[in-house]
Image (cartoon, grey):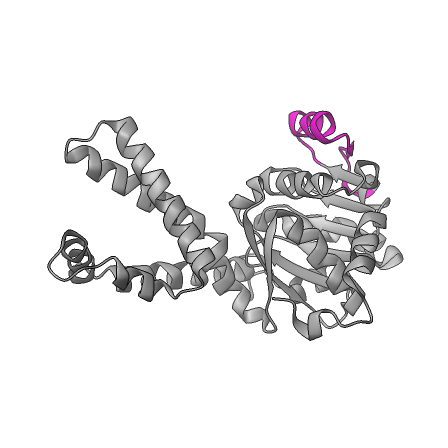
Amino acid sequence: MKTETQATTMYSDSQAEAAVNAATVTFIGGGNMARSLIGGLVARGHPARTIHVAEPYAPFREALARDFFVHVHEDNIAAAARAAVWVVAVKPDVMRPVAEQLAELAQRQRPLLISIAAGITSHQLERWLGGELPIVRAMPNTPALIGAGATGLFANAQVSLEQRQLADELLSATGLTEWIDDEVLMDAVTAVSGSGPAYVFLLAEAMQAAGQAQGLPADVARALVVQTLSGAARMLAESGEPAATLRQRVTSPGGTTAAAIESFETGGFRQLVAQAIAAATRRGQELALANEPATS
């Protein structure tokens, strides 16, 4: 969902694409999510020569240079000094020291900073970086690795319309992007889509095990489960129908599906899902608090 009147005619899609292709981007951290974003950018035509990556682990650096022909660095400051856009792709527990290390350079260079760390707020990042910087929080998920990701985005007040569009173009290299206006909701985004693929994998794991318990060979159970989940997701995406409507259409009264659905409902399936999403949301909030010094 592109808000603010589809970025308005002030900044067209062609201008945004040109801006992305011209932008020099540094990734602070070269793990799986950074790799997926880099791969998506390169696949969409972003010049590899304009991408820099800071990564302390040598095998990751070497793999990124070999696979995508991007510039790699061991040092964060050396990499960040070369770009107007910084994508900070480090874990929440190391975000503060990384930001504080980059603060002096950030104040001189005034980059657009995109953070993909769960739980860390834009206010925290802005403070650790010295204040008054344009910051976009992004929460991608692991299907970004295959170009099928979903990313929630929030921009602070310092982010211009052009920078917002630039961030959107960068993140949409790996799939869907959705903007939210209230940063508090980023923890819910994390709980629903950021962590969401794991819920589907757990369901697949459970369905396969249950099929095997009913006598299906493991390879047959797996193939049926994978295709069933893939097909159902495709129907949900392409039909435009609500999930409840699609469920009702395949649930004949007194049939096999109805028996299974009744078992799910009796077991408190909906309540369990709600509890899981709430637990993940709380954990995102706790991550922000964990990165602040204890008060006496």
Left or right of 26 in this view: 292: left
Q: Is residue 66 magenta?
A: yes
Residue at 20% across, 57% down: 261
Front-most of residues 245 and 164: 245
Tag count in the figure? 0
Is residue 168 visible to the viewer in this orientation of the structure?
Answer: yes
Of residue 277 and residue 58, the one placed in the foreground of this image is 277
The magenta segment is: 55-77
> Which residue is farthest right?
108
At a point 40% along the width and 54% down the height, the residue shown is 235
Which quadrant holds the C terminus? bottom right
Q: Is residue 221 above or below residue 77?
A: above
Residue 183 in the image: x percent, y percent? 59, 69
The residue positioned 52% from the left and 57% from the top of the image is 287
Q: Residue drawn 21% across and 59% down?
A: 251
Q: Position of residue 50 (x, y in %)?
A: 83, 41
Q: Is residue 195 highlighted in magenta?
A: no
Residue 151 figure quarter: bottom right
| Horizontal side of residue 228 vs 173, given as left or right | left
Image position, residue 58 (x, y; %)? 68, 26
Horizontal relation, residue 241 to residue 72: left or right = left
| Residue 56 quadrant | top right
Residue nearer the viewer, 101 or 296? 101
Indicate whether 53 appears above or below 238. Answer: above
**Which quadrant holds residue 138?**
bottom right
> Visible in this render: residue 132?
no
Quadrant in the picture for the N terminus: bottom right
Frontmost residue, 73 versus 42:
42
Which residue is at the far left? Answer: 254
The x and y percentages for residue 187 are 51, 63
